[in-house]
Amino acid sequence: GRIGQSYRETFQWSRNEPRYGLDMDLAGPWLDSGWDVAIFYWDMFSDEAWLPDAEAKIWTSQGRAGMRYRTKSRGMRSEDAPRQSAAQLLASAIEDVLAACGAGQAAPRIRIAGHSLGASMAIASAWQVVAGGPSASGIDASRVRLALLDPYWSRRLPPLNAQRYLRKAFYKTASSPSPAQSTSEMSLSMAAELAGRGTLLEVYISCPLMTELGVVADPSPVGELVRLKLACVVRYTSDFCAPWDLEARHLVAPNFYLHSKRFAANLAGTYAERLPPSASS
């Protein structure tokens, strides 16, 4: 696991991806533009041998693995594990940031970027903060923007990956008042509700073999959001990575997205002449 390797993604591109990454601070352009930036680490929870066990922790603390966490020296532990799901923990952290802005301050703009399984984290936490979770802050959804970076949902395949833990999740959206049958269905329902309230959704794909291959992944949320014209999709080229290095190709999306803040948005000319969406647009 990554915890045992002492690996964590940071804003240093070459550390995130030492094979192809540039020696560059990806946070700099954001800070220079007036943004505060932070990373929410949940890798101690997501570092599971069976990926669906990590995915379950996004939605409930009562899945097969609970909220056990990995330590570098003692393996998997459960003592003092949180009773909230990972998405609830992220939503609480976001609400703490909003509270710190203080009364009377202008409503902040929030961007939540989620990579791989983290796309579900971004959607679920934003929905809780905006639309109706147990501690919704009531922030205007139009002030929130979601970037789904090479998003991944596991395919529901009973009995191997039945995703029955969703019955224990608290999430019930306006369009799905009963528990969803799959994580992809739940994510789509939440994302559509957020978009309907004014949240901007953008998707960046860099490794379709990992995130769109129907044998192991369920790409239906992206396809449906695009069909409904609720999200735009940018496909990054990752041809500079070795064809067999899917991990490196998968990491292109978050690093390219953060890097794109260095470049001004080109909104001049006709639609066909403009650059595709980026962090600056």
Image (cartoon, rainbow, N blue to C red):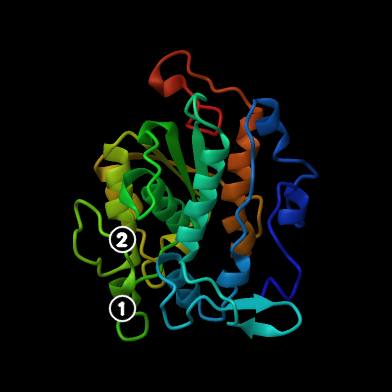
Which one is nearer the viewer's eye here, 111 or 17? 111
Front position in the image: 18 or 273: 18
Q: Residue furthest right?
A: 23
Residue occupied by mark 2: 171
Q: Residue furthest top?
A: 269
Would you place residue 30 above or below residue 187 in this image? above
Which residue is at 68% across, 71% downward? 2
Horizontal relation, residue 66 to residue 100: left or right: left
* Residue contact at pointers 1 and 2, CB within 8 angstroms: no
Estimate the x, y position of residue 247 in percent, counting from the top left.
Answer: 61, 63
| Residue in the foreground of this view, choosing between 280 and 107 | 107
**Disc with the residue nearer the chain's start (1 vs 2):** 1
Residue 233: image x %, image y %? 41, 42
| Disc 2: CA contacts within 10 A as few (<14), some (14-19) or many (>=20) | many
Given this view, does label 1 or label 2 mark the residue nearer the observer? Answer: 2
Residue 154 position (above or below residue 219): below
Q: Residue at x 41, y 77 (%)?
A: 62
Amino acid type indicated by mark 2: Tyr
Residue named by callout 1:
164
Q: Residue at x 28, y 61 (%)?
A: 185
Note whether 241 is above or below 245 in the view shown: above
User: Which residue sits at x=37%, y=47%?
Assistant: 136
Name the amino acid, label 1: Arg
Q: CA distance from mark 1 to mark 2?
A: 14 Å
Query: x, y (%) of residue 178?
Result: 19, 64
Which type of secondary structure does the marked residue at label 1 adopt?
helix
Crowd tier of the residue under label 1, counting other residues whose Cα lies within 10 Å: few below 14, some 14–19, many 20 or above: some
Extreme residue in the front direction: 103
254 left or right of 32 in image: left
